[in-house]
Amino acid sequence: MSPQPTPPRCGTSPLARLNGTVTANGAASSPREPDPDSSSGEGYAIAIEAIYSSFPATLHYYSPHLNSSLFDNEENDKRPDDIYDEAVIVDKDGTVFPAVSKTSVSNGAVMFPNTFMMQELVRGYYDETLDRADEGKRVDVPFIFTIPKGTPIPGHLILINEFISRFSLQPSRDLNQALDEFYNEHARKETVKDWLRAHPFQGAIADDADAEWMAK
């Protein structure tokens, strides 16, 4: 498989706090033109694949825990056993911006259809969990949350197709609470072990075969 490209950054208005109150309401805007007066670089945005109001395909989210556990990207060095994609970028005032970052940090929950990339990530994450358990470390049972094609997205969430088959569900208020409410209502939750049994690797779809995984 060819390597996945680095996702572009999409700067837009602040919408949420990691564990706090809403700072602004409204749907995500289209990628904007560069702001020549911006000195921070936040005014520069690159087009992303798409933003959706309902799930365009069945998507799967690898959850290291039963509940959503996104955390501040600045804590990454202190959390060596956590998944990099579970980190979000938090502004100085605690605000979370909906974004697609050049460092592959998405400000939300990263999801995929059942593609080869999804299979490789799930199997890698699960192997790391089993290794930590073998080392005597305390580990939670990881889950796969499956959200069916056509599921409507509530107003406080946006679904962004960042690149190829990679999506992120980004909230516009308290991140983990908003995601838990959505998963509890719409997702089918399975342990990773059960999901892998039901989804063998050879049954996965190529990540660039969007017509095929969009049909599921």
Image (cartoon, rainbow, N blue to C red):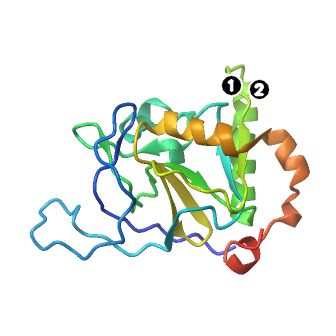
x then y, percent, for residue 149: 71, 62
Q: Residue at x 44, y 72 (%)?
A: 48
* 62 to the left or right of 32: right
Density class for disc 2 (Cα within 10 Å; few <14, some 14-19, many ≥20) is few
Residue on which disc 1 sits? 139
Q: Say which amino acid is labelled 2.
A: Asp
x then y, percent, for residue 140: 69, 26
Q: Residue at x 13, y 65 (%)?
A: 38
Q: How many marks?
A: 2
Residue 115, numbered label: none
Q: Say which amino acid is labelled 1.
A: Val
**Residue 70 visible, this angle:** no
Q: Secondary structure at mark 2?
A: helix
x then y, percent, for residue 200: 88, 57
x then y, percent, for residue 175: 46, 39
Task: Out of 169 and 102, give the one closest to the viewer.
Answer: 169
Asked where in the image residue 34 lies, by quadrant, the reply is bottom left
Task: Out of 149 and 132, give the one closest to the viewer.
Answer: 149
Which mark is nearer the camera, 1 or 2?
1
Quadrant into which the C terminus falls: bottom right
Quadrant into which the N terminus falls: bottom right
As measured in the structure, the alpha-carbon distance from the residue carrying label 1 to the one carrying label 2 is 10 Å
Task: Out of 167 and 102, give the one closest to the viewer.
Answer: 167
Above or below, comparing residue 3 to residue 119 in the picture: below
Above or below, comparing residue 104 to residue 88 in the picture: below
Density class for disc 1 (Cα within 10 Å; few <14, some 14-19, many ≥20) is some
**Residue 90 visible, this angle:** yes
* 83 to the left or right of 135: left
Taking the view exactly as shown, the residue that stands out farthest to the left is 37
Q: Residue at x 9, y 69 (%)?
A: 37
Residue on which disc 2 sits? 134
